[in-house]
Amino acid sequence: TLEGEGFGLEELRSIQDWYVKYGLQSTQGVSEVASVGGYIKEYQVDVDPDAMRAYDVSLGNIMEAVRKANIDVGAKTIDFNGVEYVVRGIGFVKTLGDLEQVVVKVKDNVPIYLKSVAKVSLGPALRRGALNKEGAEVVGGVVVVRYGENPMAAIQRVKDKIKQIEPGLPTKTLSDGTVSKVKIVPFYDRTKLINETLGTLSEALTQEILITVIVILLFLMHFRSSMVVSFTLPMAVLVAFIFMKVFRVDANIMSLAGIAIAIGTIVDMGIIMCENILKHLDEAPEEENPLSTVYKASSEVGSAILTAISTTIVSFLAVFTMTGAEGKLFKPLAFTKTFALLASVIIALFIVPALAHLFFVKRKKSQKREMKRSLKVAVILAGAFVGWKVHWILGAGVLFYGLYIFTQSKVPQQWKDFVSRYVNWIAVAVVLLFLTKEWMPLGFGKGYILNLFFVGACVFGLIWSFFKFIDAYPKLLMRSLDNKAQFWSIPIVIFVLGITIWLGFAAVISPITSPLEKIGLKKEAIHKVWPIKQISQAFPGLGKEFMPPLDEGSYLYMPTTMPHASIAEALDVLAKQNIRISQIPEVDTVVGKIGRADSPLDPAPISMIETIINYVPEYGEKDPETGKRKRLWRDHIKTPDDIWDEIVKAGQIPGSTAAPKLQPIAARIVMLQSGMRAPMGVKILGQNLQEIEDV
């Protein structure tokens, strides 16, 4: 929106149309800038019928004279004193006086001016759209990004262009002596949602890596091998980012999700390689060259690792052939998962064996002393860097490992195994502290300690159950082998229950009910039988949707007025709704539009209201002194759905209908895919156009 104290709607609209619009439209990646709201200034000629009759002037004479008056014409050239001059007639109307002096007709060599037969004034043009911000009418614009352009980059370029434009916007001195300047205030910015979404997914990716590291540490209980396997995780992710840069895959929610999905497989490759190398090193005779042992162990499982990854990569090739919305949605996921898996293969086959040879192989004392000295320096420097750039908890953990390396040679042989396990548990504790700091599953209001206990209970409870299952597995396996017939019932029940939940009970029993229908029993009668009816209601089948809803941090409130309502009546309804909605404490900004913007992309009627409502996040920014985040929502507001309920109550104005629950991006996607700007649409198919029209 364009805002400036003391400026009228017609002035702001002129600034938008003749200055801001063209400035923003020149930005790379922008397809269109559509103006909306305010009044377009125009010269209005109100004819006087009596004067026209007296001067014998027709309406056609006036229209033709006005049309010809507002043009520049060329009159070729003239030669004068050996110089050629270009002759041009300047007729662009700049003031009311210019238009009043237009000659309509010449009668008896006497010119009849427009002011003699009509009144010329400035007035607003007919409008079919308006913009309202929190109850006050405003002027604004809508920037449309070009098809195929990166929205994040395009919006950033628009912001840079706004910074260039703003110094040149007009100023006005008010009656009290203060100087008012027009400013551009964004009311809907998708970069906030994009950054929040990517930030959330990046946090989830970090948390997934940390949880995986904890699982590796607890299951392997071998600190050095755990570190080697854990090292493959961030390395594979970083290599995937390099591939994304090379193949120009943008970071979005689907591309980062592809990396998140691949993390489990990345770890598997490292664990298989490490376990096999450790096994061969333990079983190898002392005189055997450790390098050849590592080579032999790596070669043994290398082909299996490559085959396992190849099957997963090949299975995703079909995704690359997708087109339309499905292709745009899932191709980034297929790309990044493939990149991450390729990175895991490269690391598992080439980097892990080298690290294993570095950390696992026993060396001569002179080599060991030299390597330890270099390793200590490297670890201490790495710990300082991680603590400075990433987080102090991780930095402290790396420094502690450096201290462990420094003191390891001084630990008695009988205590080394205990110390190794102790260091392993210290590493688990450090990662758990950092995981809690990143995750905070109970919310910031519950405090760090309570969240730490909850995360620890979840992680250790799950790991404990896995260990219990591992202990019980031999007995379960023996019982299942001894009682094959009984244990066959378990997969059968799982299969039947799974397919019933997926397709629904009615679809599962259709092979039984179809023959009964052929012998005369009606389908409705069969499904009204009490057991069948109850089970069908309990298992209707899984619902289907194109993609899960995204919490955009804003709502699109779209009620409608009566179809015959005037623009003044629709504006009155919109203003009242915006005032009431803006009074909700959780609501940040409310900007509503009726009708259409100056764009062929927005053929909306006056009765159609579109209000973008941005609400504040549940928690504010972290307090620099206490480190806590203040909750910004009221106590009874638990979820965004509660905010929507408040909006619905506030928006109940006589003369308007109810509105479906919509979000800006989700609603636009539905409109673009279906070609319908309504919450519900019906498509009618027929043999010919006449049949369809009759229906």
Image (cartoon, grey):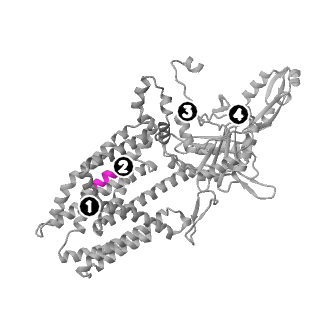
What residue range appears in magenta?
338-346
| Image coords of residue 241 (percent x, y) | 38, 54
Residue 90 numbered mark, or none: 4
Q: Which residue is mark 3?
A: 675
Name which of mark 1 and mark 2 comes first in the sequence.
Answer: 2
User: Rounded to the nearest whole Å, what is the CA distance between mark 4 and mark 1?
Assistant: 79 Å
Q: Which residue is mark 2?
A: 337
- Could you tell me which secondary element the residue under label 3 belongs to? loop
What is the x, y in percent for residue 239? 34, 55
Does dot 2 land on a helix, a strand or a loop? helix
Q: Looking at numbered disc 3 in the image, what kind of residue is underneath it? A: Gly
Report, in whole angstroms, how far the alpha carbon at label 2 lies from the one at label 4.
Answer: 65 Å
**Label 1: few (<14), some (14–19) or many (≥20) C-alpha neighbours in 10 Å:** many
| Kind of residue at disc 4 | Ile
The secondary structure type at the circle numbered 1 is: helix
Q: Which residue is mark 1?
A: 352
Reading the chain from its start, which is encountered first: label 3 or label 4?
Answer: 4
**Dot 3: few (<14), some (14–19), or many (≥20) neighbours within 10 Å?**
few
Label 2 crowd (10 A; few <14 / some 14-19 / many >=20): many
